Amino acid sequence: QVQLVESGGGLVQAGGSLRLSCAASGIIFKINAMGWYRQAPGKLRELVATITTEGSTNYADFVKGRFTVSRDNTKDTVYLQMNNLKAEDTAVYYCHVGSLYVAVPFEYWGQGTLVTVSE
């Protein structure tokens, strides 16, 4: 049974920091991509940051210089360090893992963790 367990969300003041974690278990194939998406109320889900097995990263423009994505391949865990948080970062953050360009593609989503940034 595949599980993505997210943690680290919560309430923080603007300018503060949070660190999200997502541990994947039950996936028997190699996970190529891990990352984070977010969805604010009334908006579509959007990419925040992704990281490959080799450590190649991709960030949305609105988080560059403030957020850092990392992963521990030995634990199938991805992290998102969020610094200098802004009110507009308030959203539900979803962990995403997958391997799409393989013989048997797959992807999984976490249940989401709420991040609320107060002014």
Image (spheres, grey):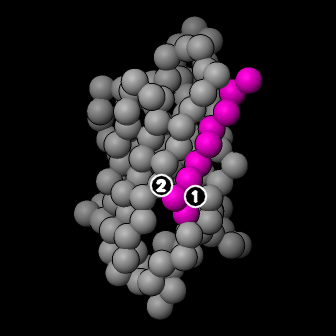
* Residue that appears at 47% across and 55% down: 20
* Residue that appears at 45% across and 28% down: 75
Instruction: Residue at the far top: name it.
Output: 103
Task: Kindly identify which residue carries mark 1.
Answer: 93
The amino acid on which the numbered mark 1 sits, given as a three-letter code, is: Tyr
Judged left or right of residue 31, residue 104 is right
Pinpoint residue 43: horizontal percent, then vertical percent. 66, 68
Secondary structure found at label 1? strand
> For the N terminus, which image quadrant?
top right
Pinpoint residue 114: horizontal percent, then vertical percent. 62, 65
Vertical order, 20 against 95 (above or below): below
Q: Are marks 1 and 2 in contact (CB under 8 Å)?
A: yes
Q: Nearer the viewer, mark 1 or mark 2?
A: 2
**Residues under labels 1 and 2: Cα distance?**
9 Å
Residue 6 part of the magenta segment: yes
Residue range of the region highlighted in magenta in the rendering: 1-9
Pinpoint residue 61: horizontal percent, then vertical percent. 35, 61
The amino acid on which the numbered mark 2 sits, given as a three-letter code, is: Leu
Image mark count: 2
Vertical order, 31 against 95 (above or below): above
